[in-house]
Each structure stands twice: as structure tokens, then as C-alpha cells.
């Protein structure tokens, strides 16, 4: 598998976060270390920022400079796939540049899930939801799958809605799944995806993966073998991650 790490300097809540120091290494290098531990064939950092390029090169990473106009990390990955001339059936994992606590075992699992589902264009992961607050939180993306583990739908809404349980407020197992935003793609799919405009469902939910379902692509979903720590979106997240690595 190939891993592409999209890394942007601009961030509304935490500008320049890929270059933030985390216990002696940049946040970007911490993510790169996760990728290396997964046993990937090739790791590429995709960025449009020279400062990020220079830091990545300093710790030995391969860098592809991409167009600053890309709207999403997936669009940036599509450019990398084209620039590297990857074969359509090669596996490309999208590892976000602000996920320094992503378990390498989970990266491998998502890639292996794609390999074991030849009719899927991409694969991702989920884990069980165990409390009502997480279930009803719109910042927690839920996924519903079919009997073979293919995604039926993703939503910020609480799905599937447990009608009897919620009406009675009785305790019981949630039977709901939280989506983990880690993807393995077939390189040929990424090229197609980047050509499609955003669909109505994607714009409504603000969930890019719905574009794939809208166009009839299959998404294989595995139950995660390991849970990732939260990513870095805010200064508070950064301090939490710094404390984690400082403890060793």
C-alpha cells in the first residue's frame, strides 16, 4: 500500500499545525512515524506549502507539491496519484496530517479490508457506540452497513434510530457504529472521484464519502482492531497530544 498524508498550513482554529512541536518532533513527523510503522510500501506527504515541504524533507520524507486550489484532501491525493502514475488497482491510504495517534495496525487493517473486497472502491473503519451522548452528537459521524459489511449510509444524525429504546429511555445496547475517518482507496477510483462534483447528500451532511455512494461505488467497512486517539483540531487538542508523547 501507498500512504498519502495531505498537509495544509492554513487552519481556521490552529494555523500551521503540521509544524507544531510535539515533544521534540513536528506534528507532521509524528503522523509520518505512524505511517512508517504500518509497513507501507511508500509514504508521500502532499502539500502546497514550502515550509511544510522543507520540514518533511528534513526528516527524510518524500514530498509532492500540489495545487493550492484543492478543496479537500481527497482532491490533493488525486493529484498525487496522477503525478506518481500509480496503477488503477494500487491501494492508497489517506492518512490525515493531524492524526498522530492513528494506530499502525488500523492503517494496515483498512488496506487489507480493501484488498479482501475486490468489488469495493474504497474501505474504511468503524467502532461501536456505547452511550447516548456520542450517538446524538452531530460531530460524531455514524455509519450503517449491510449484512456483508458494505456501507449503506453515513450521517451526522443518530442512525439507525432505536425507536422503542429511545421512546422508553430504557437501557440497552446501542447497536450503532461510529465512523473512523481513515480511508483506503483504489488509485483508479480516486481519479474518478476527483472529477465528480459534490452531490446533494454530501453538501447536506458535509460528508465527502457520500459522493461515492451517490455514484454507486461500494465502501467496505471493518470494525477497528484498535481505536485511534483524537486528532488535532484546536490548541487544546495540541496540548493533549503533547502531554501524551511527553509521557512516552
Image (cartoon, rainbow, N blue to C red):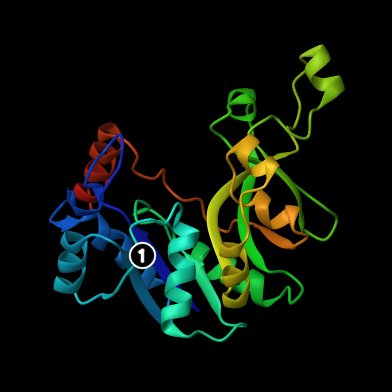
Q: Residue at x 56, y 86 (%)?
A: 87
Q: Residue at x 31, y 54 (%)?
A: 8
Tell me where residue 241 appears, x and y as whole percent: 28, 44
Q: Is residue 104 visible?
A: no
- The residue at which mark 1 appears reads as 34
Q: Nearer the viewer, residue 192 or 26?
A: 192
Q: How many marks?
A: 1
Tell me where residue 189 appears, x and y as whole percent: 63, 71
Give the side of residue 134 with respect to residue 117, left or right.
left
Give the side of residue 154 with respect to residue 103, left or right.
right
Q: Is residue 182 above or below residue 83?
A: above
Q: Secondary structure at mark 1?
A: helix
Q: Is residue 157 above or below residue 18?
A: above
Q: Residue at x 14, y 72 (%)?
A: 58
Q: Is residue 92 visible?
A: yes
Q: Residue at x 64, y 43 (%)?
A: 202
Give the class, few, some or many, for how many residues have Cα within 10 Å of label 1's Cα (few <14, many ≥20): some
Image quadrant in which you'd find residue 103: bottom left
Amino acid at each position: 500500500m501507498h500512504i498519502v498524508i495531505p498537509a495544509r498550513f492554513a487552519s481556521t482554529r490552529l494555523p500551521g499545525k503540521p509544524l507544531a512541536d510535539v515533544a521534540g518532533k513536528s506534528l507532521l513527523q509524528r503522523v509520518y512515524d505512524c505511517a512508517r510503522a504500518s509497513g507501507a510500501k511508500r509514504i508521500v506527504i502532499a502539500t502546497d506549502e514550502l515550509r511544510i515541504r522543507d520540514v518533511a524533507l528534513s526528516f527524510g520524507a518524500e514530498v509532492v507539491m500540489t495545487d493550492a486550489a484543492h478543496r479537500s484532501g481527497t482532491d490533493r491525493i488525486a493529484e498525487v496519484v496522477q503525478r506518481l502514475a500509480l496503477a488503477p488497482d494500487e491501494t492508497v491510504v489517506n492518512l490525515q496530517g493531524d492524526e498522530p495517534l492513528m494506530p499502525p495496525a488500523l492503517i494496515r487493517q483498512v488496506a487489507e479490508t480493501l484488498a479482501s473486497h475486490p468489488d469495493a472502491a474504497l474501505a474504511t473503519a468503524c467502532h461501536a457506540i456505547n452511550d447516548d451522548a456520542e450517538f446524538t452528537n452531530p460531530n460524531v459521524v455514524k455509519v450503517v452497513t449491510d449484512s456483508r459489511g458494505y456501507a449503506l449510509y453515513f450521517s451526522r444524525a443518530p442512525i439507525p434510530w432505536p425507536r422503542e429504546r429511545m421512546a422508553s429511555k430504557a437501557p440497552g445496547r446501542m447497536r450503532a457504529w461510529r465512523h473512523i475517518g481513515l480511508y483506503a482507496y483504489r488509485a483508479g477510483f480516486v481519479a474518478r472521484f476527483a472529477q465528480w462534483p459534490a452531490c446533494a447528500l454530501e453538501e447536506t451532511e458535509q460528508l465527502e464519502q457520500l459522493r461515492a455512494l451517490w455514484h454507486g461505488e461500494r465502501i467496505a467497512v471493518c470494525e477497528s482492531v484498535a481505536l485511534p486517539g483524537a486528532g488535532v483540531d484546536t490548541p487544546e487538542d495540541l496540548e493533549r497530544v503533547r502531554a501524551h508523547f511527553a509521557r512516552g
